[in-house]
């Protein structure tokens, strides 16, 4: 096991990020290359996405200058041939006597005559610079692109644009030669990344996009102006949000789906062509949100931080029953305390940040705080240190105060005590509420989530004798804590990857995160099988059906993640790596 862990860590730190067959990330620029169309109507489309505050040079530079022009060209000797000049979707401006593109995404198009099948080798060159310094130039980087196309969703007949301001976005819409698709997205939006890396790579979708001008609007910080523009003009914070504009008519699509849902895929293609849209902000979207909140609460009940509250609950209400108090109103007050704490969190989030929930969720500082919280809570669960309540709260949890106020405070104390395990699930509900873009969603979601936790405890409070029928805490709970702690540590990487992309660390990306997750899965497989033990664990003398099944599940997961490290496309998981291109499917 140590050897496997060591190899995976070495892999994540030493090997470069895996390149997809149609793109790469080098020297501060992410490049996606695709061939759109076929035969003598084909064209190579390359999308250059520099890091923040970086730009690339124009298509042509004077001889004997220090810059490197941004170029795509066919490799010598290839069967494809160039049939037109290289063009860009943005105009250059002069900087220190040289032509440079403005900061942001730049799309180059090279008309070619492409073979019917096979790959076309494309050579990519560029130099990324800031106002003060330049990176190492990338010269004639070879990229193999499928001649049949459909490896990228960024090609569109009217061009692909990424505006930096609302004024630029409005100007692009006004200047578009035909229908426009405005795509509100961002690196922190997992559903946006999922759609971009699955649905938007379908050949039929790319063909439908070919008739549109595609405007990619990143509403993550620091693009607060664009986020505000989305709210003011389109009255929505939903992401993803696809707005089709044509001669003053507007249709929109917000539903997230898989390409395997053929009916929904055909609806989306029809929407791109001018058909009706689908707004998941109501109906099915609300239903999915309620299910998420309910399931999150039910899973929380099984967590090791929640289970120890059972004896506290029974002790408190046994004392109240002995004192002659009616249990029903006390139990309801207890449930109200649990719900009040979580609903208060929803009110705090929505009340303080109001209409900027989506901006808050995408901010790298927010993701850093959540990631660090997961690290701290995960380390606490695996026993690196102990998280203790203040003595006063511990006394309240022990049932030292009676009456309705005591029951209410004890419910609040329950929520605080169980925070170590509830944070990931409560955070998921809040994140889903943010995605809906409605102020009341966070409050309603937290009410449903906490209600599914509170109701069982209310019934337990009414029947203290039920405690005798529950399994007693023991070594099984310690194992549950270890598993939960390792999972929380692994989950932290998802949030830190957003920070890495925003701040340009170049450390936490697809390769390193997959290596961490694979190592965690393999460690858990060995732990459940009893191959290694922690303090407080019982020795596993026989591998029963439950342990065998659990171990096999994590072993399979680990091997699947290793396949992703080797270049396999992991589908939904690819959406967690906005800074890396997904491997070809």
Image: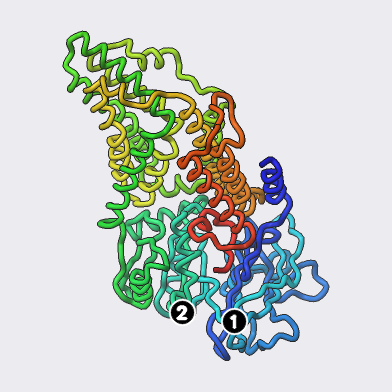
Q: Is residue 135 left or right of residue 46?
A: right
Q: Quadrant of the N terminus?
A: top right
Tell me: residue 152, above or below residue 2. Answer: below
Q: Residue at coordinates 62% horizontally, 71% vertically from top-left? A: 22
Q: Quadrant of residue 385?
A: top right
Q: Which residue is mark 2?
A: 207
Tell me: residue 162, above or below residue 155. Answer: above
Q: Quadrant of residue 55?
A: bottom right
Tell me: residue 382, above or below residue 39. Answer: above
2 vs 1, front mark = 1
Nearer the observer, 336 or 501: 336
Q: Residue at coordinates 61% horizontally, 72% vertically from top-left? A: 33
The image position of residue 318, as x and y in percent, is: 26, 14
Q: Which residue is mark 1?
A: 147
Q: Residue at coordinates 61% horizontally, 52% vertically from top-left? A: 509
The image position of residue 404, as x and y in percent, is: 23, 17
State the separation of the CA atoms marked 2 and 1: 14 Å
Q: Residue at coordinates 56% horizontally, 29% vertically from top-left? A: 539
Q: Name the secondary structure under disc 1.
A: loop
Q: Name the secondary structure under disc 2.
A: helix
């Amino acid at each position: 096991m140590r050897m496997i862990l060591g190899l995976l860590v070495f892999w994540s730190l030493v090997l470069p990020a895996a390149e997809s067959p149609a793109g790469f990330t080098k020297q501060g620029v992410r490049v996606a290359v695709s061939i759109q169309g076929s035969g003598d109507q084909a064209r190579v489309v390359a999308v250059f996405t520099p890091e923040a505050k970086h730009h690339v040079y124009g298509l042509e530079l004077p001889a004997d200058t220090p810059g490197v022009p941004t170029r795509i060209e066919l490799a010598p000797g290839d069967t494809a041939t160039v049939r037109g000049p290289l063009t860009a979707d943005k105009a250059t401006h002069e900087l220190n006597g040289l032509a440079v593109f403005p900061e942001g995404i730049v799309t180059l198009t090279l008309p070619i005559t492409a073979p019917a099948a096979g790959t076309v080798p494309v050579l990519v060159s560029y130099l990324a610079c800031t106002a003060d310094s330049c990176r190492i130039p990338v010269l004639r980087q070879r990229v193999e692109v499928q001649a049949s196309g459909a490896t990228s969703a960024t090609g569109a007949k009217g061009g692909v644009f990424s505006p930096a301001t609302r004024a630029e976005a409005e100007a692009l819409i006004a200047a578009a030669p035909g229908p426009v698709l405005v795509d509100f997205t961002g690196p922190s939006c997992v559903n946006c990344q999922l759609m971009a890396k699955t649905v938007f790579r379908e050949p039929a979708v790319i063909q439908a996009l070919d008739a549109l001008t595609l405007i990619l609007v990143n509403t993550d910080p620091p693009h607060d102006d664009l986020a505000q523009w989305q709210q003011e003009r389109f009255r929505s914070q939903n992401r993803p949000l696809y707005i089709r504009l044509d001669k003053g008519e507007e249709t929109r699509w917000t539903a997230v789906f898989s390409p395997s849902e053929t009916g929904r895929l055909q609806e989306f293609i029809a929407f791109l062509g001018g058909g009706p849209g689908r707004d998941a902000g109501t109906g099915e979207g609300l239903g999915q949100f309620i299910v998420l909140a309910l399931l999150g609460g039910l899973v929380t009940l099984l967590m090791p931080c929640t289970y120890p509250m059972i004896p506290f609950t029974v002790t408190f209400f046994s004392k109240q029953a002995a004192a002659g108090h009616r249990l029903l109103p006390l139990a309801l007050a207890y449930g109200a305390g649990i719900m009040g704490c979580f609903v208060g969190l929803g009110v705090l989030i929505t009340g303080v940040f109001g209409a900027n929930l989506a901006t808050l969720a995408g901010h790298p500082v927010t993701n850093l705080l959540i990631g660090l919280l997961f690290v701290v809570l995960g380390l606490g669960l695996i026993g690196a240190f102990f998280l203790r309540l203040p003595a006063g709260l511990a006394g309240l949890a022990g049932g030292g105060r009676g009456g309705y106020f005591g029951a209410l405070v004890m419910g609040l104390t329950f929520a605080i005590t169980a925070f170590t395990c509830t944070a990931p699930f409560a955070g998921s509900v809040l994140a889903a509420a943010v995605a809906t873009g409605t102020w009341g969603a966070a409050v309603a979601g937290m009410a449903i989530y906490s209600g599914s936790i509170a109701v069982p405890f209310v019934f337990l409070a009414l029947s203290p004798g039920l405690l005798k029928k529950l399994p007693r805490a023991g070594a099984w709970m310690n194992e549950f804590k270890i598993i939960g702690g390792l999972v929380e540590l692994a989950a932290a990487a998802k949030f830190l990857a957003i920070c890495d992309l925003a701040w340009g660390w170049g450390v936490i990306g697809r390769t390193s995160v997959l290596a961490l997750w694979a190592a965690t899965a393999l460690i858990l497989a060995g732990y459940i099988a009893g191959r290694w033990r922690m303090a407080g664990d019982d020795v596993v003398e026989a591998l029963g059906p439950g342990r065998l099944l659990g171990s096999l599940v994590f072993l399979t997961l680990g091997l699947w993640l290793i396949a992703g490290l080797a270049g396999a496309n992991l589908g939904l998981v690819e959406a967690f790596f906005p800074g890396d291109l997904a491997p070809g499917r």
